[in-house]
Amino acid sequence: MTIMKRSLGNTGEDVTILSYGAMELRGAPRGPEIADDDAGRLLNAVLDGGINLIDTSPDYGRSEELIGTHIGGRRDEFFLSSKCGCPLDLPTDTPPPYRHDFSPGNVRANVERSLRRLRTDRLDLVQVHMSPSETTLREDRTVETLKDLQAEGKIRFIGMSGILPNLPDHLAMGVFDVFQIPYSAVQRDHEALITRAADADAGTLIRGGAARGAAAEDKKWRSGPLSQTPGTAQRNWETSGIAELLSEAGMSNMEFVLRFTLSHPGLSTTIVGTANPAHLAGNIAVAQKGPLPDDLYEEAKKRLPLP
């Protein structure tokens, strides 16, 4: 079986509906410890499993370097997505989020360093990180800087990693080829905005589409960053009756949550990250099944509340 592909907006690219998020390769102390050889095996397994989009960032620790080292030689096999606005030197004594800088100098420095780390001559997509306001983007000339880099052939497409409350303004600007947006069965805040992005012919990279691993790990459902109050995801799950519905369907929580995300008609791909080869294989197996059956999807949407 292969993983279904969808068009990435009007970029002309077709991407697998499951993408790999490389944040879990950032290394200690902010992520799991992973040996270089293990990272190499995992990244090659991503491509061997049929995934053709990898998403990373300058502030994902060693992620970019590991990608460049271990699959730089397979560069033509995948669409490579990174970000900008990130601090060049991450503090060692404070947890994220870190102050981002969307000025021309820092955006250009991010892209130039990403190119070196990733051992490539072009980034397929560079996304503005952390959803800055339209005012910040205009004052810092962020989009103009990205367009300059695009004209130089260093990046192909321009994107925004956006969330409420600023995402509607980003969509209205009409300058972004791709939007990265959080969404899952227990975090439906941005559901209509995904549709708006797709209707505007933009590609959509959905993050959090597996509810950040809670389903697979049998942990508490975690609410999404910034856009939900604590405990919302847990309450949504417990009060919806979804557990009973899935029991009747013979489907695990993890399969349901990932396939629910894949069922959104405006989705181009969902980014799921892991440092665990078994979890990667499981994610690929679920993605190969594609979206949920229509009747199950519609019933689930009735039971899971919109905000």
Image (spheres, rainbow, N blue to C red):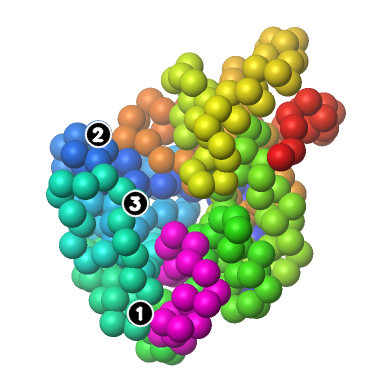
Instruction: Give the alpha-carbon distance from disc 2 to disc 3, as whole Å.
Output: 18 Å
- Along the line of sight, which residue is nearer the eye, 152 or 69? 152
Quarter holding the N terminus is top right
Q: Quadrant of residue 108?
A: bottom left
Give me the disc on residue 32.
2
- The answer to whether residue 251 is magenta is no
**Residue closer to the observer: 99 or 263:** 99
Kind of residue sitting beneath label 3: Pro
Q: Residues within 10 Å of mark 1 (few under 14, many from 20)?
A: many
- Give the vertical position of 127 relative to 151 (above or below): above
- In the rendered structure, which amino acid carries the disc numbered 1? Ser
Q: Secondary structure at mark 2?
A: loop
- Counting residues from the start of the chain, the first of labels 2 and 1 encountered is 2
Q: Nearer the viewer, mark 2 or mark 1?
A: 1
Distance CA(mark 1)–CA(mark 3) = 18 Å
Disc number placed over residue 97 in the picture, else none = 3
Q: Which residue is mark 1?
A: 103
Residue stretch in magenta? 120-146
Amino acid carrying mark 2 in the image: Pro
Q: Compare marks 2 and 3 and give the one earlier in the sequence.
A: 2
Report, in whole angstroms, how far the alpha carbon at label 2 lies from the one at label 1: 31 Å
- Left or right: 242 in relation to 5: right
